[in-house]
Amino acid sequence: MTAHVANPSVNAAISNIHPEVLKKYYGCGFCTPDILEGKTVLDLGCGSGRDVYIASQLVGPKGKVIGVDMTAEQLDTAREYQPYHAEKFGYDNVEFHLGLIEKLDEIDSLEDGSVDIIISNCVINLCPDKEAVLRSCHRLLKEGGELYFSDVYSNRRVPQSLREDEVLWGECLSGALYWNDFHNLGKKCDFKDPRLVEDAPITVNNREVQEMIAKTGNGDLEFFSATYRLMKLDCLEPFCEDYGQAVIYKGTIPRAESGWALDDHHYMETGKVFPVCGNTWNMLKETRFEEHFDFVGDFSNHYGIFDGCGTTIPYKSAGMNADSASAGGGCC
């Protein structure tokens, strides 16, 4: 899975976590956005609690972290070492719940509009009802909050025969969503403008899986690990529209003094005027990022679709393992 390179604060946080919790961690990296202090974070598929206890330190004593997992044994480990971490951190701001992430409505303590950020790492692709997961996430998020997660995607729809294959399931590939189906599903669940943060090709090293994919006539089927951010903002439009706006990044987000990236095609250098579409403007203006930017313009004049807003496969890594050239992404 893709995940940001651990920054010093994350590395320090990991060093504070009990070895038994780390030993039972089966995830792939740590997937979280910037600016978590004082926020309420929900971790879907939290397992033994490693990421919950990392986030616990990043949100601080005024924040809160909630972990949900379907495996009782994993949660037993997470809860067993909760007092240890409370003593280590100097506060206890975590809670754990047993449940399916496609049935979050069955967890009574999870209230609508109560969560700032939802994180997840290679879990949603394993759920048969992905729409239920996304709808619950939208319901639980505060306005301006976001779902920030890494998962597995494909360049085309995975045939039913492969989706039902146990070996492919064990490789976390059979549940991969075709990228455009995911974008459409996100929009259907009111996440109007899904943003790709980073991606990487997934190399299938299992010979049995390689042969199975080839024999079924799906040799051009490709898989990607990708991190997305889906923001809950009612003001977003279906496409990126041009209002002649721009932003100027102040260089004030921790560990991003020279520049900061909202997604894979919006890296903003400190102090430089950066033209943006209306959606990007709102993603920065109507969220926790506002104080870190100056804003130029308004919505009084419309100049059409924002240049470069396309619908081709967005993954920069597409085609890296093939003979064809990679297809570039657009604004959306």
Image: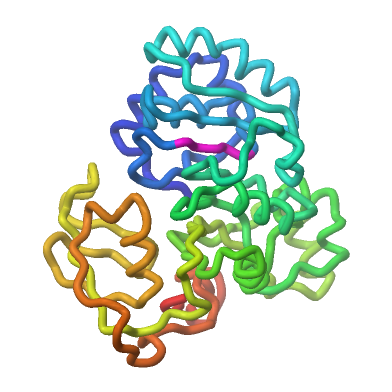
- The number of discs equals 0
Snapshot quadrant of residue 104? top right
Residue 243 place in picture, x, y as percent: 31, 83
13 relative position to 139: left or right: left
304 relative to 248, above or below: below
Q: Which residue sits furthest front?
A: 300
Residue 289 place in picture, x, y as percent: 31, 53
Does any portion of residue 4 appear in the rendered image?
yes
Q: How is the image coloured?
A: rainbow
249 relative position to 228: left or right: left
Q: Is residue 119 found inside the magenta-colored segment of the image?
A: no
Q: Which residue sits furthest left?
A: 271
Query: Which residue occupies 47% across, 65% down?
Result: 195
174 relative position to 189: left or right: right
Residue 251 place in picture, x, y as percent: 17, 53
SS majority, magenta: strand
236 relative to 65, above or below: below
327 relative position to 154: left or right: left
Query: Which residue occupies 76% across, 43% down?
Result: 103
157 relative to 84, above or below: below
Q: Nearer the viewer, residue 192 or 329?
A: 192
Q: Is residue 43 found inside the magenta-colored segment of the image?
A: yes
Residue 51 place in picture, x, y as percent: 51, 31
Does any portion of residue 222 appear in the rendered image?
no
Q: Nearer the viewer, residue 125 or 298?
A: 298
11 relative to 243, above or below: above
Query: Which residue occupies 50% across, 48% down?
Result: 142
Query: Which residue occupies 37% across, 33% down?
Result: 38
Snapshot quadrant of residue 63? top left
The region drawn magenta spans 40-44
